[in-house]
């Protein structure tokens, strides 16, 4: 049997394990503020100056040039701590090249609706959608359609029979955008589910959100965006496609440069603040980028944002590889533009960009150096007196004459 003093000698090692080991994988959310605001333009930095390893990012460019889908990548932009640390353009594109960001547009539409809500133009997300269209005669009416709320539109759970991903001749997206009244086409669509029950991707629902912004504010959505987002962010080089009624398409067709896409991500990274102004309510940023629907183990959906609990991020995602990723845990925004639906952004992120930032795919970043230093100091403060006591007891045990009865 171990003597008491022998057990005491083990205590310092146990304490070292308890105090230091759990710090690995701990990444506290600390207060952080940008050194500047990129309203008039981004500043650049070396990756190393922002705590990143440039060898990963260089290797990523090499990888893109070698893989068979790499020719379709148009740009990659990595912003860390508010600085562009990596920026690559492929082919004839450059930082001034605008692209249709397709369904990334939905995240802008959602944000504008959140701003309209905060300004009192919309009273609640529980408002019934049809209350905004009382002047229209709507086909396929039933109790389910009457129950659709604004929140159902935001979460893609309105319940319409809308097989958008079929991409066929009868695809509702194509039929809507070729019609003379896009809003009417969406409102007339038959119902397939109770609102709130089934997630179904629906760009028509996103356009209804844009129309609600238009109706509630009395401004075209693109005009409202100009005042509330684009001008404050310094986004001047843009275009936004419109429906036959001259209102911005809520589901797609916003054209931006990659750097301006990054500004939008940076706005959300900073909880809706920009240069001292709260452009988007912080509560909206939190709610819009949370998972309201779980699609699978790796993917959720918020208010027109995709969520990824596995790597603690959220993203705006558009057709043919237009992507805006936000990683709050490492103060990073990543933008991709491409011309392919086969862009392996998960590979680029998990094998190159996230490791460059010291973030493991499991979702647990490497130990914070300051935390480890503090843990070691704390451990020493405990271990030294315990060790001294252990040594003293061991000395007494060995030098005290044994007695017997």
Image: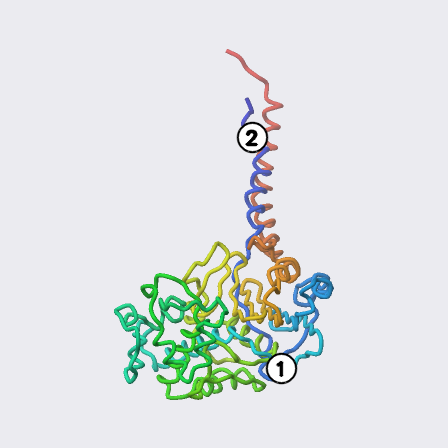
Sequence-earlier tag: 2 or 1 = 2
Q: Residue sitting at 69 percent across and 63 percent down?
A: 68
In which quadrant of the rendered view does residue 14 lie?
top right
| Residue 117 image position (x, y, % from top left) | 37, 78
Closer to the eye: label 2 or 1: 1
The one nearer the camera, 77 or 3, is 77
Secondary structure of the residue carrying tag 1 is loop
Q: Residue sitting at 34 percent across and 70 percent down?
A: 190
| Residue 372 image position (x, y, % from top left) | 60, 52
Q: Which mark is residue 7?
A: 2
Gap in angstroms between the C-alphas marked 2 and 1: 63 Å
| Dot 1 crowding, Cα within 10 Å, few <14, some 14–19, many 20+ | few
Residue hosting label 1: 41
Q: In the figure, is residue 102 to the left or right of 74?
A: left
Q: In the figure, is residue 263 to the left or right of 130?
A: right
| Dot 2 crowding, Cα within 10 Å, few <14, some 14–19, many 20+ | few
The one nearer the camera, 212 or 29, is 212
Q: In the figure, is residue 340 to the left or right of 300?
A: right
Quarter of the picture containing the N terminus is top right
In which quadrant of the rendered view does residue 345 lie?
bottom right
């Amino acid at each position: 049997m171990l003597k008491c003093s022998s057990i005491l000698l083990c205590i310092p090692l146990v304490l070292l394990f308890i105090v230091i080991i759990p710090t690995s994988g701990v990444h506290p959310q600390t207060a952080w503020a940008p050194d500047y605001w990129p309203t008039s333009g981004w500043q650049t930095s070396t990756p190393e100056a922002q705590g990143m390893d440039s060898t990963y990012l260089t290797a990523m460019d090499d990888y893109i040039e070698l893989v068979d889908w790499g020719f379709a990548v148009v740009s990659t932009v990595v912003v860390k701590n508010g600085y562009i640390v990596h920026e690559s353009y492929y082919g004839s594109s450059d930082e001034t090249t605008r692209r249709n960001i397709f369904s990334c547009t939905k995240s802008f539409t959602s944000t504008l609706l959140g701003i309209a809500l905060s300004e009192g133009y919309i009273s609640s997300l529980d408002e019934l959608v049809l209350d905004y269209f009382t002047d229209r005669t709507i086909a396929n009416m039933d109790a389910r359609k009457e129950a659709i709320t604004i929140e159902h539109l935001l979460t893609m759970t309105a319940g319409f029979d809308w097989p958008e991903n079929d991409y066929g001749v009868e695809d509702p997206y194509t039929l809507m955008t070729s019609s003379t009244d896009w809003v009417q086409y969406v409102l007339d669509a038959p119902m397939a589910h109770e609102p709130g029950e089934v997630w179904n991707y629906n760009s028509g629902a996103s356009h209804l959100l844009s129309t609600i912004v238009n109706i509630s504010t009395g401004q075209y959505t693109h005009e409202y965006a100009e005042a509330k987002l684009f001008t404050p962010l310094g986004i001047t080089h843009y275009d936004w496609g419109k429906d036959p009624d001259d209102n911005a398409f809520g589901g797609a067709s916003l054209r931006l440069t990659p750097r301006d896409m990054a500004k939008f991500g940076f706005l959300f990274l900073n909880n809706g603040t920009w240069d001292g102004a709260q452009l988007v309510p912080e509560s909206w940023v939190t709610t819009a980028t949370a998972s309201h629907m779980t699609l699978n183990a790796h993917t959720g959906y918020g208010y027109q944002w995709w969520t990824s609990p596995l790597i603690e991020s959220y993203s705006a995602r558009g057709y043919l590889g237009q992507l805006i990723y936000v990683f709050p845990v490492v103060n990073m925004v990543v933008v991709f533009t491409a011309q392919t639906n086969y862009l392996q952004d998960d590979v680029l992120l998990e094998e190159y960009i996230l490791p460059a930032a010291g973030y493991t795919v499991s979702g647990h970043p490497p130990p914070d150096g300051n935390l480890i230093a503090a843990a070691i100091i704390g451990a020493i403060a405990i271990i030294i007196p315990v060790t001294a006591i252990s040594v003293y007891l061991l000395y007494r045990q060995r030098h005290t004459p044994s007695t017997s009865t």
